[in-house]
Image (cartoon, grey):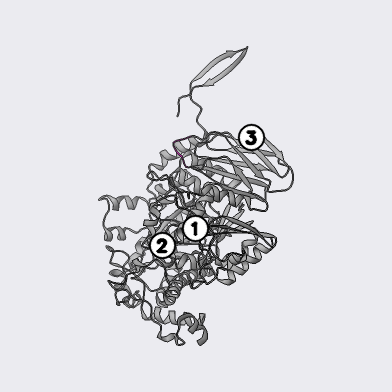
Amino acid sequence: MRTVVLLLLTIQGFAVLETGVRAETRFEQRSRQKQAIASEIVWFNHEPLVFYLRRGRMWEDWPAIYERQHAPENIQLMADIGVPYGRLHFYKGLGLKTEMPEIEKSAQMAELMRSHNMRVSLYVAGTMFIEPFYKEVPEAVTWEQRDQNGKWVPYSNTQTFRHFACNNEPAYRKYIKKVLKVGVDLVKTNQFFFDNVYVKAEPKSCRCDRCISAFRQYLKQKYPTPEQAFRRFGYRDLDIIKVNEWDEFNQPYSLKTIDDPVLQEWTRFRCEKLARQCNEFYDYITSLDPTISVGFNLKGIYGENRYWKAGVYHPLFGGKCDFFPFDTGGMDARLDEETGALVAEIRSYKAARTLDMSCTSGGNDLEYAVYMAFNHQKFKTGYGYHGGPSDNGAYRSFTPLAEFFREYNDRYFRGTENVADVVVLRSWPSMAYSIADTLVPTILMEQVLIQHKIPFDIIFDEQISNVDRYQAVILPGQESLSMEIIEKLRQFVEKGGTLIFTGNTAAFNEWRERRRTNPLLGLLREDARLRETIAKGYGEGKLVYIPEVQPGSERIGVSVASGRPFPSRDWLLPVNHQQIADTIAANLSRGLSVQTEAPLTTVMELLTRRDSKETLLHFVNFDLHRRLEPFGIRLQKQFSGEVRSVKLLHPEEDEPVEIDFRAEGDSISCTLPGMQLYSMIVVGQ
């Protein structure tokens, strides 16, 4: 415990207590007490011991440590510090017979956990261990993915004893359902988590007979008439279609764009077949017990075209996925030490919220603060909330900040809706058929919104009907747009919305065929790319064109020149970031919902809680070496009626602090009196 020095002073007859060192907050006290207990805990491990022994790379005393996690006294320690959740080892892909002894240990642990009111999560891997599994299920060798040369597809370069099963093999899916039934009946789980949810990048994508047959059927359903097939491929007979093959002179790594119509459709097909398998597992689990939570390791959205590379397109999991983790290298929240770029998974949180999914994360205090500020805590009847301060990844942290979040989670972080003035549309063909170039203006535009604290969402083509809730739709270099999407956006503007587009947006159609005239520039009555920012009225709304999102790093051109990913270290604000932010703000019909003087090294999220008529402002300071000076906030009222109070909550104070505010019509102004890492403003009406 901290030493507290008390000095009694007399000033004009008044006795004053002055503290040399401030008293310990209750969050610090809980943190200290819990960390002492947590140091004795062996945390749940989702991998069975047999996997570690087969893989190698472990400490010599690992088997003994591994066994300790199953001990009743170990689970009791978790209960003593209020841990409400744990993910257990269940199925790694070695076969039910091989893994059953470990599964039975998990069943015993699950029973103990339930006695302490802890929720049980089970891990399910997505590969087949060819040594024990093929001995147990010999026919499984026919379930494998096969590349263009008929060779099996390994998990990694070293773990060649793990092969991927074909997503189009019904016998494999039937076997996994058998596994899941064990988790429901024997372990009585509350949650399943599926790992290895992706398909291997070219040239290792599955080209087995099942997949080629399913692909041709997919094409026939999408282009059912000879005329439609001819317009798309130049052939009327879709049975002759062959998917692009690779050799030493023709490598997928050299692609900058996907222009081959068959390869475009193959990219979408791979995404759909992966999602279809996961959707089937979700439906099967919820048919057994609708209260069971189901998550998939989709990872987030970042500087890589994962539609093309991994077959993961998040909207295809909408309604069939309760949560997903990030599990991504290079995306840890930070101000990059080399470049100064502000890096965070904010885009992933934004996408998850609009798709009604939750994210799971944890890590250091900065990661934790971003997680709590931006995450959508999805509620599922019978299971409860996902994504809070005691969920997977977060439940092992016992810092004062984590304890602060635990205390206030139910009161302020659940049941919220985010406020978004603008929305970024990430168009499927624009993001899928450009390997990396389209990622640059998209990510940098989002970086402007993040660091200038303009409330925004991210949506995809499938959500285009939701644009009416926003003041503006932003298309940052979305080069490939269908006329159907363009018409919906035109109607949005005509009814009073603002459409902001940049660079070569709409220069191509949805098949990446170049247009003779750009339909969006046509609405502006311009027939060529402009060199200056222009805003014109259209109907009741506005069209705004910004010529370029100018990269803030010279390395970006080199980074994406050969289709390589756009690394987070180069996510620097564009050179013209202030102009872009000012242009957006100036062309919103109702203005920005919030304006703040907080520096560009902070991020903000604006939310409301309808049940309590409260507006919440979360601020996170990424400059860990500097305490922020006081800064002003101007906020539009989000509910009718007078503002009753404005409170500041942060982990440095035991209790909320009332803040003076000034009401001015439909808005209020106040000053946040400085902050360290995290602060929350609560406006009550």
Q: Give the mark, 1 or 2, whose residue is nearer the N terminus.
A: 2
In the picture of the structure, the residue carrying the numbered disc 3 is 659
Residue 195, labelled with which disc?
A: 2
Q: Are marks 2 and 3 in contact (CB under 8 Å)?
A: no
Query: What crowding class fits label 3: few (fewer than 14 Cα within 10 Å), some (14-19), or many (20 or more)?
Result: some
Distance, label 1 to label 3, CA atoms, is 37 Å
Distance, label 1 to label 2, CA atoms, is 28 Å
Q: Are marks 1 and 3 in contact (CB under 8 Å)?
A: no
Query: Residue 623 in magenta?
Result: yes
Q: At 52% across and 86% down in the image, what residue appears?
A: 227
In the picture of the structure, the residue carrying the numbered disc 1 is 442
Task: Report the front residue among 530 and 377.
Answer: 530
Distance, label 2 to label 3, CA atoms, is 46 Å
Which one is closest to the eye, mark 1 or mark 3?
1
Establish if 195 lies above or below 224: above
Q: At 67% across and 50% down in the image, what residue appears?
A: 611
Span shown in magenta: 622-626
Where in the figure is residue 200, as x and y percent of width and height?
A: 36, 68
Main secondary structure along the magenta-highlighted residues: loop
What is the total number of numbered labels drawn onto the structure image? 3
Type of residue at label 3? Ile
Where in the figure is residue 509, as x and y percent of width and height?
A: 52, 71
Left or right: 427 in relation to 164: right
Query: What crowding class fits label 2: few (fewer than 14 Cα within 10 Å), some (14-19), or many (20 or more)?
Result: some
Establish if 430 lies above or below 244: above
Q: Is residue 389 in sight in this rendering?
A: no
